[in-house]
Amino acid sequence: MSLLPAPPLRALCRLDDIPEGGSRGFGPAPGGFTGLFAVRRGGQVVVYVNSCPHIGTPMDMAPDRFLSADAGRIVCATHGAEFAIDDGVCLRGPCLGERLESVMIQVNDGVVLVPWDAGL
């Protein structure tokens, strides 16, 4: 039985670059079309592709602004759809029940790593 090698990773940012209880956006990887965004809450980080499942528009209202006023949900700037932070499921809006595209991450020595092709 042979094991496939792990996909190459790239550094997204330092963990400390994402404010606790906040979010941060990242432009596309070189040659990419879609950026990523990260949310940090309770010491945990989740990363999603910055594209609404409804029509594919970017999620941020302004740079690094992905969260509701109470920081309890991710909000799409285009039509106000609301998504759960933990799993990206749409809780309210035209894409109800759909989910954001999550990105697998690793955190090593305080650096958030994502697959090299995340957001392409």
Image: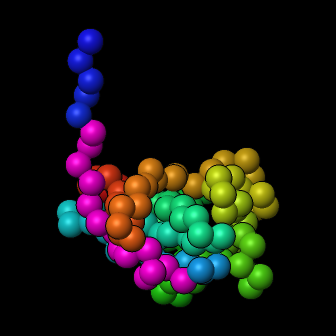
From the top left corner, tell me how far across and down residue 105 is, in percent.
43, 55
Residue at horizontal 39%, vertical 70%? 110
In-front residue for pair 82/95:
82
At 66% from the left and 57% from the top, the residue drawn is 86
In the displayed structure image, the side of residue 48 where residue 94 appears, left or right = right
Residue at point 48%, 70% (across, down): 37
- Examine the rendering and report whether any part of residue 33 can be seen: no
Q: Residue at x 54, y 65 (%)?
A: 45
Residue 45 or residue 96, whichever sits in front: 45
Q: Colour mode?
A: rainbow
| Numbered circles on residues, count | 0
Residue 105 among magenta residues? no
Location of residue 19 (image quadrant): bottom right
Region rendered in magenta: 6-19
x and y percent of residue 68 in the render?
A: 72, 79
Is the residue 5 above or below the residue 72 in the image? above
Q: Where is residue 46 in the image (x, y as percent from the top left)?
A: 54, 61
Q: Position of residue 107 (x, y in %)?
A: 41, 61
Question: In the picture shown, does residue 66 fall above or below 52?
Answer: below
Viewer-side residue, 81 vs 47: 47
